[in-house]
Amino acid sequence: MNSMKDYPFFATVSRMKYIERWALMRNSRPENLSEHSLEVAQIAHALCIIGNIRYGMNLNADRAAVLAVYHDVSEIITGDLPTPVKYFNDEIESAYRKVESVAVNELLKQLPEDLRDAYHDILHENDDELKKIVKAADKLSALIKCIEEETAGNSEFATAAVSTRKAIEEMIPECPMVKDFLESFIPDYGRTLDELMGR
């Protein structure tokens, strides 16, 4: 007979697929937190690879990808607070950061004790360099969403596209590989499958 206790961490994390993003905006296609996190992980991994190969950096691409997978995990508890609200002023942003931290700690309690430290280091990442990479990847994912919505004829995302691109460009001095991703990969988003496959 199995006497091990049940731990709901992964069952809870799997609910990321039920958290919809961009709640205040009209979407032509909803985007959930699971698919967003996968895209951010792919981009963060690519940014590290580009940084290492083209800029002589020594970034852990695999770790960046894992951090990106979990970067919004607190939203299972908090929900996706829209960016204009989250960053409305310093007081709200600070309060939200505290709420996020409490949410993450609650999720960590859903793990067996011997695994908590390992996941604490993922969910409470303190590597500033990799945090910057994940943040850049997060913004690039937001820009991709804007492009896809505009391509689908949804003008709702036009202003968000401009402000997101501006925020990304401001990251380039500290993360030069962001420029490479913008120039080499972003132009193909919004193209048809036939165009992407060269048909």
Image: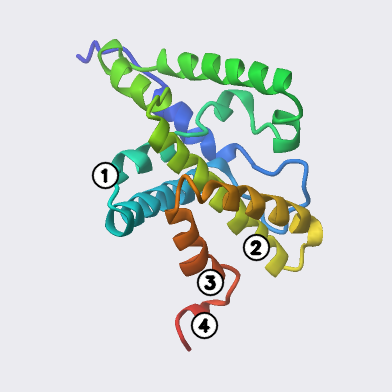
Instruction: Identify the disc placed on residue 147.
Output: 2
Residue reaching furthest to the front = 173
Depth-wise, is mark 2 or mark 1 nearer the camera?
1
Q: Disc 2 on helix, strand or loop?
A: helix
Q: CA distance from mark 2 to mark 4?
A: 18 Å
Q: How many numbered marks does the figure carry?
A: 4
Asked if the residue under mark 1 is in contact with the one under mark 2, i.e. CB atoms within 8 Å, the reply is no
Q: CA distance from mark 2 to mark 3?
A: 10 Å
Q: Disc 3 on helix, strand or loop?
A: helix
Instruction: Please name the residue that numbered disc 4 is placed on.
Output: 194
Instruction: Please name the residue that numbered disc 3 is placed on.
Output: 188
Residue drawn at x 50%, y 48% is 173
**Mark 3, residues whose alpha carbon is within 10 Å: few (<14), some, or many (≥20)?**
few
Q: Where does residue 128 sit, x and y in percent of width and height?
A: 42, 31
Instruction: Please name the residue that numbered disc 1 is placed on.
Output: 58
Q: CA distance from mark 2 to mark 1?
A: 31 Å
| Mark toward the start of the polypeptide (3 vs 4) | 3
Depth-wise, is mark 4 or mark 1 nearer the camera?
1
Identity, as a three-letter code, of the amino acid under mark 2: Ile
Q: Where does residue 183 sit, x and y in percent of width and height?
A: 50, 67
Position of 126 compared to 135: left or right?
left
